Amino acid sequence: MRVSHLALDDFRSWKHGVVELPEGPTVLVGANGQGKTNLVEALAYLSTFSSHRVGAEGALVRIPIDEAEAAPGGAVIRARVVAFGREQVIELEIVRGKANRARINRAQVKPREILGIVRTVVFAPEDLSLVRGDPSVRRSFLDDLATQLSPIHASVRSDFDRVARQRAALMKAAQASLRRGQSPDLSTLEIWDQQFAALSARITATRASIASRLEEPAARSYDDVADSPRHLHLAFDASVDRVIGTDPDNPASADLTDVEAQTERMLAALASVREKETERGVNLVGAHRDDLTLSLGAMPVKGYASHGESWSVALALRLGAFELLSDDGDTPILILDDVFAELDSSRREGLAALASKAEQIIVTCAVAGDLPASLDHHALHVRLDPERGTVIDEADNE
């Protein structure tokens, strides 16, 4: 898979730009703050509808440098995608304050219909938070991977978020009633519990399956990039397991991928924490509290691994994701966003060798000296023009 052309209108620092991207490695070279990462962020956004940098879509719409210029109402990303010998042009319009719009070959479609057409794996300095950050970062990692493998996961997540907010509002109202010495109105709680449990079980099942499939390729990638006697292990940590145990008479209760069994377990877990939830006004169990546990041998990665080991684990997770997304024979686009500067020479060469498996690789860097010598690439020089926004100055082969 590759994107032959990427066009941006009012996306971040790009006012209007069309970039031709060849096969193989392309390196975007330019000083910090010129718009290199904005370009790859736009490409990655088409694959998951999420950014590795910000959570709010509004931040993706260009803010004019000239304060006298009216702010645009939205941003547009267009890409010509080549996969399995077939070309498609997809377009996503990010509209400030309104629902997004999408097109495939100029035909209007629902935005979720373009998910899965472009597949990307992004490795960026922010990925250190996969190891050291909050569980929400690891959940997002699994969810983004699941969305590319099965786009319906994005809809399930959206439904769950909506139901979780409604149920949390009910818990908040119950808490307020208790503080006033009144009995809370929980007449609708059973309905919300049923929806919450069913959606939570589906999300947890998908994440657990992804984590299980990811462990082998991630562990293999860690062995390739890290000079360490320890081996990487992944374990999915479902919040329901922290609240109630499994039923020894029902083997399905231990299978996190069994949606029906896990729905029943989630209902039981919700019942067991109901009093605490009404006291605190929050949802205390559910897919929004899942996590992914990482360890090197018997050593937990978080809090114990060195800086180099943490980088290697983060890189291994991304390379493992690359392998999973390549199972159908079509490799995803590999994006390496300013990461070579963070790696020592041996890890740079190791990453370059592993990256050679991709049909298309896009690398950003501030100086060409950060690149491994073995990386034969096409260079695009990027700069920020005060009037035209980010532009490509010239292209050459290096």
Image (cartoon, rainbow, N blue to C red):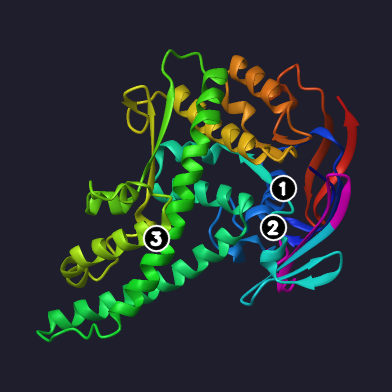
* Residue 281: image location, x then y, percent: 24, 71
Residue 191 location, x and y as percent?
34, 79
Closer to the N terminus: mark 2 or mark 3?
2
Residue depicted at 64% across the width and 75% down the height: 99
Query: In terms of depth relative to the viewer, which is nearer, 387 or 192?
Result: 192
Per the image, the residue denoted by label 3 is 260
The disc at residue 12 is 2
Residues under numbered marks 2 and 1 in contact, where contact means CB atoms less than 8 Å apart: yes
* Residue 328 within the magenta-colored segment of the rendering: no
- Residue drawn at the location 68% of the way across and 44% of the way down: 120
Q: Name the residue tied to disc 1.
A: 35
Q: CA distance from mark 2 to mark 1?
A: 8 Å
Part of the protein shown in magenta = 63-88
Task: Judge by depth and name the residue closer to the eye, 180 or 249.
Answer: 249
Bin the neighbour count of mark 1 within 10 Å (Cα to Cα): few under 14, some 14-19, many 20 and up: many
Q: Amino acid at mark 3?
A: Glu
